[in-house]
Amino acid sequence: MTTGGQKREVFALAALFVAIAAVTVIGFAHDWKPPVASEEGARVDSLIRYLLFATGAVLVIGAAALVAFLWRYGRGLPSPAPRSDPRLERWWSLVPVLGMAVIAEVGVLVKGLPVWKRVYGAPPPGALVVEVNAQQFEWWVRYPGPDGVFGRRDPHLVDATANPLGLVPEDPAGRDDVVVRNALHLPAGRPVHVRLRSRDVLHSFSIPEFRVKQDVVPGMITAITFVPSRAGSYQIACAELCGLGHYRMGARVIVHPAEEFDTWLEGQNGALQ
Ligand SMILES: [Cu+2]
């Protein structure tokens, strides 16, 4: 091929890389997520930002190097470089691998692990413990009531209208338990420990503003902790296809200022009272 033809190819490639880089940068610059409303969510965002910028920088540097080499050696001129140099190649395999490992590990260890510990570690003392029960196609929320103890449950006692969670009436701890359908009331600024249970199939407890998404698995309890940081009303959406009614398996999270939440909870009757 003529030198002119190759020059055009290099220009076209350079234009392609610049376009990819521009789209990437513009895509990163725009915040596609809903405004964050939990303390952990802010940290998750920070981790995502770090990984996007770090790997984005690697992409741009790599593409620029590729174009530069094409420009320098891709014009049909005899290359001054030796055809192969195993030692150099080994080094230039090792350096990017180590570089990427450092970028990833810094993200995971420095930024990721502390968030993981907050979300999946033991809840801090004073955390509000709430039970969220998923079933086709609704969410049942249970608070332990003034005694702070959840009453026992028996699957045989489940009754769709009278006793949806199968609370055992003989258990005094369960008498003051507060049960709410499709609404999760929470206080702002206080750690919340959510215990997730499913009555039937796999569901997923997802609150985009909290950056929370946790599978709800029948036969086991999954638990997460987070601190709602902003009063407001947000959507809980089931994020796991769980049947024909999956699309309508939604509920609201209502985050109250702390005192308002206490007033709300005191105003609720026990499920079995
Ligand atoms: Cu579901």
Image (tube, rainbow, N blue to C red):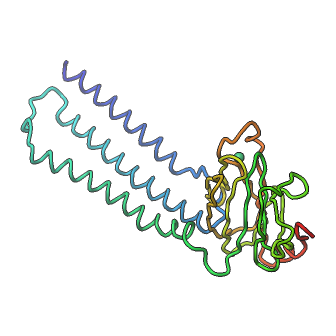
- Rendering coords of residue 240 (x, y %): 65, 45
Residue located 22% across and 53% down the image: 95
Left or right of 194, for residue 110:
left
* Residue 115 x/y as whole percent: 52, 67
Q: Quadrant of residue 186?
A: bottom right
Percent x, y of residue 117: 51, 69
Of the pair 115 and 240, the residue shown nearer to us? 240
Q: Is residue 34 visible?
A: no
- Which sits in the foreground, 22 or 188? 188
Residue at image x 20%, y 47%?
Answer: 93
Image quadrant in which you'd find residue 163: bottom right
Q: Residue furthest top?
A: 1
Horizontal side, residue 117 vs residue 77: left or right: right
- Vertical comparison of 128 with 22: above or below: below
User: Would residue 266 be visible to someone looking at this image?
Assistant: yes
Count numbered badges in the picture.
Answer: 0
The N terminus: image quadrant: top left
Q: Is residue 249 left or right of residue 161?
A: left
The residue closer to the viewer here, 13 or 115, is 115
- In percent of width and height, residue 75 lies at 18, 28
Is the residue 159 above or below the residue 263 in the image? above
